[in-house]
């Protein structure tokens, strides 16, 4: 962004990371947005945390705002900004939005241009937005996307799918109970719910996603890491060292999984007549402390498939916000947001 230093949440020299302004920022400026500044992210959008606290933290007990888009979610939650931009490579928009009690939107892969953004894993990186509510998200999405269809308004009531199996079992018991109660609210409002067993190979899918992240990050950072290794956070060092050991053939094999999962989910949605998937936006509320940004496991498969996903505030557990994740079909971003706007009024 012109006029502000770019650090990527890192200690690398500023001149190394200097570049042209991202089109996503330029488009907001052209629409009249007043840019207040930049927020804190984890180091290079991975797991090395920054100093930002969750605005909902109890006094004297800091909780993480999530990551990597830590400051983006926290700034909206604290009322410092009406709209912020973030990125998601695993769960870096949906999870922080849930932890901070705001709306977050990760579009279908490449619906919002990634140019001008420091890459982590280009095949998985998504640019998205945070706002206090979905009206703000929808407005921003229409400005940022390469194209946007406004005719999705007035769509019939969707059928919601619940992805039963090893993926859903990764949620904490309290979160799973909250999620099922939220789903029942929707059923009570007249929505059809279908429980479907999917992603039975979830553990292997997760490994493939992390292999892509590590391998592509190592390739992005080859020159910088060789020169500035001592300036990297130890969590990023571990990622890059692991990624350097992954061969091009292994990376290609892992990348094939993205399209395969997208196809698998599309086939299930067609067969079961499902319009939107419902799932927890995170394993539970924000963990205590700032050493970790939490586990993005509940967001990982939808990012892997490149599908559009939304996080909506759905209540609290132990006094901290939690969220409902809605995931749509490939490139059905507009329809997803239309359905999510209706859900927002119910939960």
Image (cartoon, rainbow, N blue to C red):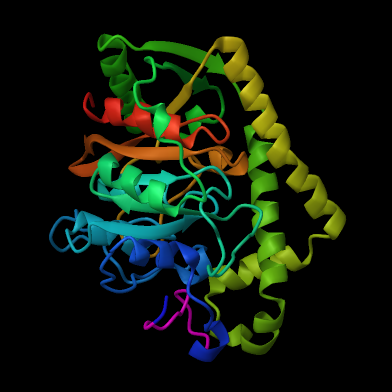
Q: Principal SS element in the magenta part?
A: loop
Q: Is residue 270 left or right of residue 61?
A: right
Using the image as rendered, state which of residue 183 and residue 5 is in the foreground: 5
Residue extent of the magenta highlight:
3-13
Residue most toward the left? 59
Residue 309 vertical placement versus 49 (above, below) = above
The relative height of residue 37 versus residue 265 in the rendered view (above or below) is below
Q: Residue 328: x, y in percent? A: 49, 30
Q: Can you see residue 64?
A: no
- Quadrant showing the C terminus: top left
User: 159 or 58: which is nearer to us?
Assistant: 159
Residue found 25% across the figure and 72% down from its top: 36
Residue 292 inside the magenta-drawn segment: no
Residue 12 located within the stretch drawn in magenta: yes
Would residue 21 be found to the left or right of residue 38 on screen? Answer: right
Q: Position of residue 323 (x, y in %)?
A: 32, 37
């Amino acid at each position: 962004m012109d006029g502000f230093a770019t650090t990527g949440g890192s200690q690398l020299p500023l001149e190394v990371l200097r570049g042209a302004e991202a089109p996503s920022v330029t488009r907001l400026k052209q629409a009249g947005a007043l840019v207040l500044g930049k927020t804190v992210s984890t180091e290079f959008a991975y797991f090395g945390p920054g100093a930002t606290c969750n605005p909902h933290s109890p006094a004297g007990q800091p909780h993480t705002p999530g990551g990597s888009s830590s400051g983006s979610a926290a700034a909206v939650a604290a009322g410092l900004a009406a709209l912020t931009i973030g990125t998601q490579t695993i769960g870096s928009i949906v999870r922080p939005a849930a932890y901070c009690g705001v709306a977050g939107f990760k579009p279908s892969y490449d619906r919002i241009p990634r140019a001008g953004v420091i890459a982590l894993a280009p095949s998985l990186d998504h640019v998205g937005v945070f706002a206090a509510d979905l009206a703000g998200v929808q407005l921003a999405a229409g400005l940022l996307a390469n194209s946007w269809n406004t005719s999705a308004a007035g769509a019939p009531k969707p059928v919601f799918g619940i992805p039963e199996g090893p993926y859903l079992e990764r949620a904490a018991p309290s979160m799973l109970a909250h999620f099922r109660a939220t789903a029942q609210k929707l059923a009570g409002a007249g929505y059809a719910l279908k429980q479907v067993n999917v992603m039975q190979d979830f553990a292997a899918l997760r490994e493939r996603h992390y292999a892509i992240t590590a391998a592509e990050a190592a390739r992005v950072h080859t020159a910088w890491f060789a020169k500035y290794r001592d300036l990297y956070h130890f969590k990023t060092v571990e990622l890059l060292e692991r990624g350097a050991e992954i061969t091009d053939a292994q990376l290609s094999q892992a990348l094939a999984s993205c399209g395969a999962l997208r196809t698998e989910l599309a086939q299930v949605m067609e067969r079961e007549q499902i319009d939107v998937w419902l799932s927890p936006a995170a394993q539970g509320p924000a963990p205590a402390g700032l050493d970790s940004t939490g586990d993005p496991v509940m967001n990982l498969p939808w990012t892997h498939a490149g599908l559009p996903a939304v996080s909506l505030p759905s209540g609290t557990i132990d006094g901290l916000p939690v969220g409902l994740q809605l995931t749509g079909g490939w490139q059905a971003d507009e329809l997803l947001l239309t359905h999510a706007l209706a859900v927002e009024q119910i939960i």
